[in-house]
Structures are given as structure tokens and as C-alpha cells.
Image (spheres, grey):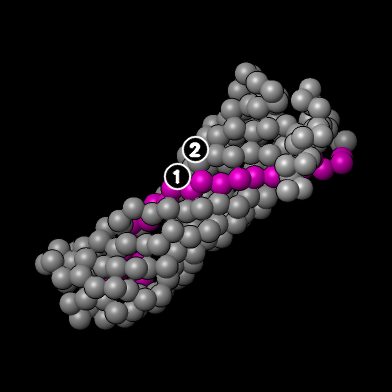
Amino acid sequence: MAVVACLLVTPQTAQAQSSRLYLSGYMGLNTYSSREFTHPTTDGAVEMKNGTAFAGALGLRLTPNIRVEGEIAYSRADLSNMTLDTGASGGLGKNVKTWLYMANVYYDFDVSWKNITPYVTGGLGMAIHDGGIAGAPGGLGDASDTSYNLAYTLGGGLKYQVKPGLALSGGYRYVGTTDFDIGDYSIDYGAHEFRMGLHYDLPVDFLK
């Protein structure tokens, strides 16, 4: 309600940024399609439940259109089911916790309507997956492990300039990593993330 009230009382002409340096906070919903896995004895697919994601970032505007962010993000996906190529399937226990350490680039387009500006984004970094599998079908056995992987993101969205120094954003991005390991399981990872962001300009002037 506080955000809605702020939007209602803020003049629509507010466009300017008050600083080149800013902080961002994000909250998102991660959705997962069925992910393939390999195992020394068989292959198959793993299903994950939707989960929440949280992130914080420090950003720098290099030009009026280009900005970069250093981001740390956390998400968790509960494992729900495993299906083997043999046709056997069963429910799974445990989950996969993922930390992302990303360097992201944003491009804000020159077009704007009622203080709303579209953007596109992409990033590269590292993912740390901490996962476990319990109750796998076919007698494959339980496992737990921590895996370090290359991560990448690609997406876009809209940014709303509430007032100078404060903006909201809403967008989508795809988060992918190289295959991560849980014991003898090697699992493909990809998440569709829908998220909201709050951006606050830091009151510093040495970068103006």
C-alpha cells in the first residue's frame, strides 16, 4: 500500500537520476521446466517446484543508457519428481539452493512513456548449487553435494521513475548455468524468473 500511495502522489514529470551510483533490491518468482539429468546407470528428468528468489545489487550508470550491476542472488527449488528413461518415476525429497554472483549489463532505451522506460539486460557470473536428492526411483540412491558453475542471464523489462533518485522495475530474465552435480547425478539447470525491483540512488556526487 505504501508503494501505491507513493506512486499516486508523485508527479509524473519526474525523470532525472540524482546520482550515477545506486543500490537495487529484487524479489522474484522462479519457475522451472523439467530438467534433464545423467547418471552412470541411466538418464532421465527432474522436476522442481516454483520458488522465490531474492537479490541485492550495487549499480553504476556509465552513460545515460548503459548501466552495470554487481549482484548477489539467492533462490531455492524443492525437488518434486524424477522420471527415468526406463519409465520408472517417483517423488523426491530435498532441494537445490542456489547462490548467484553476477556482473550484469543493462541498456535503458531512449523511449519513455509516463516515466516508464524499457530495458534489456544480460549477465555472466558464478553459481553455487547446494543440493540433495532423496527417494530416487530405480534404487539410484540418495546424494548431496555442492557444485560451482558458470552462470548467465538474459532478460528485459520496464523501469518506472517514481521521482529523482527512486525507481521501480518489473521484468523477466532467464537464469542458466552449466550442468551441476549432486553426487553421481549431473543436472541441467535453468530458471524463468519474474521479478520486481527497487532502485535507490546513493547520495554521492564524486561520480557525477
Q: Quadrant of the C terminus?
A: top right
Where residue 93 appears, as percent x and y from the top left, is 36, 76
Number of labels in the image equals 2
Residue type (three-letter) at the residue carrying disc 2: Gly
Q: Position of residue 197 (x, y in %)?
A: 64, 45
Taking the spot 52% from the left edge, 35% from the top edge, the residue there is 156
Asked if residue 207 lies left or right of residue 119, the reply is: right
Question: Per the image, is 196 magenta?
Answer: yes
Quadrant location of residue 88? bottom left
Whether residue 58 can be seen here: no
Separation of disc 2 and disc 1 at Cα?
6 Å
166 vs 118: above or below: below
Contact, mark 2 vs mark 1 (Cβ under 8 Å): yes
Image position of 138 (left or right of 111) = left
Q: Name the element at disc 2.
A: strand
Q: Magenta part of the protein: which range? A: 180-204
List the single residue furthest toward the left: 86
Residue 117, picture quadrant:
top right
Q: Is residue 152 magenta?
A: no
Q: Which mark is residue 174?
A: 1
Residue drawn where x is 50% and y is 41% of the image: 172
Disc 1 residue type? Tyr
Q: From this viewpoint, which residue is outermost toward the top?
A: 111
| SS for callout 1 | strand
Residue that numbered label 2 is attached to: 155
The reply to whether residue 125 is in sight is: yes
Residue 76 pos. (x, y %)? 49, 64
Q: Identify the main secondary structure in magenta.
A: strand
Q: Quadrant of residue 7?
A: top right
